[in-house]
Image (tube, rainbow, N blue to C red):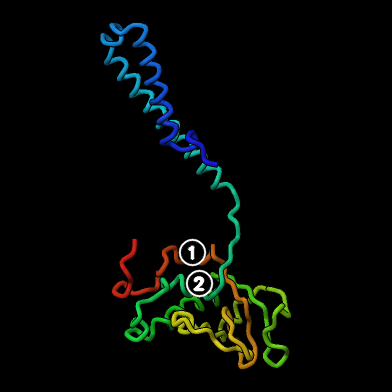
Amino acid sequence: MLRIKDTPAGRTGLVLFAEVLGAGAWALVDQDFLQRNAIWFVAVALVGLGAAWFWDEIADYREWRRQRGKPRVEQWMFIDDAVRYLADFPLPPTMLLLDPSFSIRVSNALKDRLVCGDLRARGRPFNVLRGGIQEPALHPLKPIDAEVWQTAQIEAYFVLSGIVRQVAAGNHMNVVMTGDNEGFHDVVVSRNELEDLWPTRGALRPAKGRDKRK
């Protein structure tokens, strides 16, 4: 649970509160002295606030150094969610009609990075003629080689249109076909690498079509 002293504002408030209590206690002892040295008390209060701010800056810097030295946790996201991230889904209702090539640009941007090896992916291989996609899965999650993406199909249009594709006699999401009867399902890409390549959500979305969001 977050405590008052764990926040910069809380620590500054505690310092100021302590100074007010100290000044009040001294005023009860000697009011004339307090009146004669009012400027001195104000100066002490300002110095205390400055010291609290400086201490917060040092604590923030030390925390930043500590976090920087820690290894980054590997995170993964489904490939359909990666498409939505790049397009800033949901889209305006008429966007795909006014700009039909937008989904193709999203697919190509992902494929280019996957083929070059800049973006890693994992998936479960399947073959329609050898069991297809089943639950529980027939195969474990495995890395997808970069060469596979040269012939793979990332159907961004279906994802951005909210249409679930029919693959292997069923409706499935996060599926990538690499041939007529085979491909990968439960496909995920590295979230860390995706956000390093495109730090801003909706990076591929045209400025004219982007909603005004904070």
Please, what is the three-letter code of the amino acid marked with disc 2?
Answer: Ala
Position of 85 with respect to 144 (left or right) is: left
Q: Quadrant of residue 122?
A: bottom right
Q: Pick whichever, 167 or 63, lies toward us.
A: 167
Residue where numbered disc 1 is placed:
195
Residue where numbered disc 2 is placed:
82
Q: Secondary structure at mark 1?
A: helix
Q: Do labels 1 and 2 touch, CB within 8 Å?
A: no
Residue at left offset 39%, top offset 73%: 204
Residue 210 coordinates in the image, percent (x, y): 33, 71
Residue at left offset 33%, top offset 64%: 213
Q: Pick whichever, 13 or 126, lies toward us.
A: 13
Q: Secondary structure at mark 2?
A: helix
Q: What numbered label is drawn on residue 53? A: none
Q: Residues within 10 Å of mark 2 (few under 14, many from 20)?
A: many
Please, what is the three-letter code of the amino acid marked with disc 1?
Answer: Glu
Residue 58 coordinates in the image, percent (x, y): 46, 34
Residue at left offset 34%, top offset 84%: 99
In the picture, the quarter occupied by the C terminus is bottom left
Question: In the rendered image of this protein, does residue 32 appear above or below residue 150?
Answer: above
Q: Residue furthest front?
A: 28
Nearer-N-terminus badge (1/2)? 2
In the picture, the quarter occupied by the N terminus is top right
